[in-house]
Every structure is written in structure tokens, then in C-alpha cells.
Image (tube, rainbow, N blue to C red):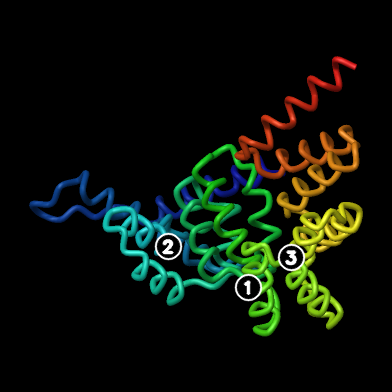
Amino acid sequence: MLLVLCQLYLSFLRAELSAAAPIRREGESGRCKRHTVVFSASAAMLNRKWKGWGPVVFRSRRTPILLAGYRQYLDDGDLRRFVDHVAQHYRPGTLERLLTTGDTLVRRAAAFGLGIVGEPSSLHVLGPALASADRQLRLLADDAFWAICQREGNPDTIHRLRWIQRCNDAGRFQQAEAMASATIASSAATAECYYQRAVSRSHQGRFYAAQSDCRDALSRNRYHYRAMVLLANCALQVNDPLDALYWLRCALDVHPDQERTRVLARRLQRAALER
């Protein structure tokens, strides 16, 4: 069927060229005139509306505006200009599409841009990019991934989450757990909120409760590799090295750039083989 259509197309083109016979004027080059005729005939053919078909439209392979802004940022390091550039020209959905369909540099720029304007729905696109063959893209996607995780939820949830993180960083684990539990009880919990409560509980020696929170976090965000690493650490604390090895491997599958996790996984694998 495709061969027949190609033959019909060539026949139609020959007929158009024959109908538009070149007329040579005095002092005019026959070669230039021929090119003019061919162009005119081709344009007439492409603009003709066939039955059931619209006019043929060619799309130019233009450089995305995003790439121009990203290259400028790489040259001058002006982050504010790039932020304004992305916010003015792009929405998250467009950046998500560029992240999955663009070339290497466009994908890097899209990942960088999603860290600025990305929404929680962008996580399912950034997740696979965490394991990309391009290391620079992995790192950019990782930064964007966690930036979006920090601003997931309504403004009150985001404010609470930041307070919980500060408490955990300062070693006030009981306060962090209490605030995280209150946030979860209000039905406004995010994956990061469950993870932060797991952190506070693990530091208080409540490893099984922390593992439960980590699983809740993964049920909401399956690319949350930090929850996988914490699951592994809790498994080691309850003397379950095989479960720990499983979760370490899962974390490395999601994001390979975790050297400490890789070292621990190798150590556990050697210990398992020596038994």
C-alpha cells in the first residue's frame, strides 16, 4: 500500500512539472529558470487540499527557547535570569515533555527548569531520570526531585514540613515526631512528611515504626530512595541484613549516585556470601 502511494505521488509530481513548462526569457539562465519552475510546481502541489487531507505543513527544527536560556546560564551563571526565563516561557507539562523527548542538553535544561516551576505531578517524570545514563542529567534531576518534594502540599503543610526538618536537624526528635503526626492526622500528609517522621522515630530507637512510615512514604512516592535507605538502616538495627541488602539495591536502582549506599551494599553482599 505504501509503495502504491509513493508511485502515485511521483506520477503526480511529474504531471505538475510537465504542465508547468519552463519559459526562457532573453538573457535568462535555463538552469535558474528550471529551479524556479520546480519550486513553483512543488509549492502548488503541497498547498493543494486533497480529499480528506488538509494542507501539508512542515515543522522547522528550531532550538527551544529553554535551551537558549540554559546556555546563557552556563555562560554567565545568572540564576535569577534563568528562573525568570523559565517562569515566563514554560509550564511544567512542557518541561516534562522536553525531559522525555529532547536531546541531551535539552533534557538537562528541562530537569533544571522543573526544579524551579515543577509540580508534584512532575515527580513521575523526574523519577526515571534519576537513573539516566547521563550523569549530569541524573544530578540535575535529583536536585529538582527533592526541590519539588519540599514544596509538595498546601502552604500550611509546606510550612510544617520545614519546621519538622529543622527539628530533626537540631536533634529535637520528639517535637518533630509530634508535629509530623499532627500533620498526618490532618489528612495533609505527603511522602516527605512520613519520611521525616520515620527519621525522628529511628533516632528514638523505634525502628519498626520507622519502617512502617518509610513504606507509607514509598506508597506515595515510589522514587523516594532516601526512604529505601532508611528502611535498610532500620533493618540492620533489627538484625535483618538480607532485608537491608534488598532495600539498598532498590535505592541504587532508583539513583545510582550514592557511594556510601553502594559501599554498604557490597559489604552486606560479601557477608551474605561468606555465610
Q: Nearer the viewer, mark 3 or mark 2?
A: 3
Give, as a three-letter code, the residue at label 1.
Answer: Arg
Q: 74 or 147: nearer the eye? A: 147
Q: For the C terminus, which image quadrant? A: top right
What residue appears at the point 56 percent right and 49 percent down from the top-left corner? 9
Q: 88 or 253: nearer the eye? A: 253
Distance, label 3 to label 1, CA atoms, is: 14 Å
Q: Which residue is mark 2?
A: 66
Relative to 82, is 269 above or below?
above
Q: Nearer the viewer, mark 1 or mark 2?
A: 1
Relative to 39, is 44 above or below?
below
Distance, label 1 to label 2, CA atoms, is: 31 Å
Which circle's residue, 3 or 2, is located before the other in the chain?
A: 2
SS at circle 2? helix
What residue appears at the point 80 percent right and 55 percent down from the top-left corner? 202
Distance, label 3 to label 2, CA atoms, is: 42 Å
Q: 9 or 21: nearer the eye? A: 9
Which mark, by number, is residue 162? 1
In the rendered image, residue 176, in percent from the top left (x then y), is placed at 73, 70
Q: Which residue is mark 3?
A: 173
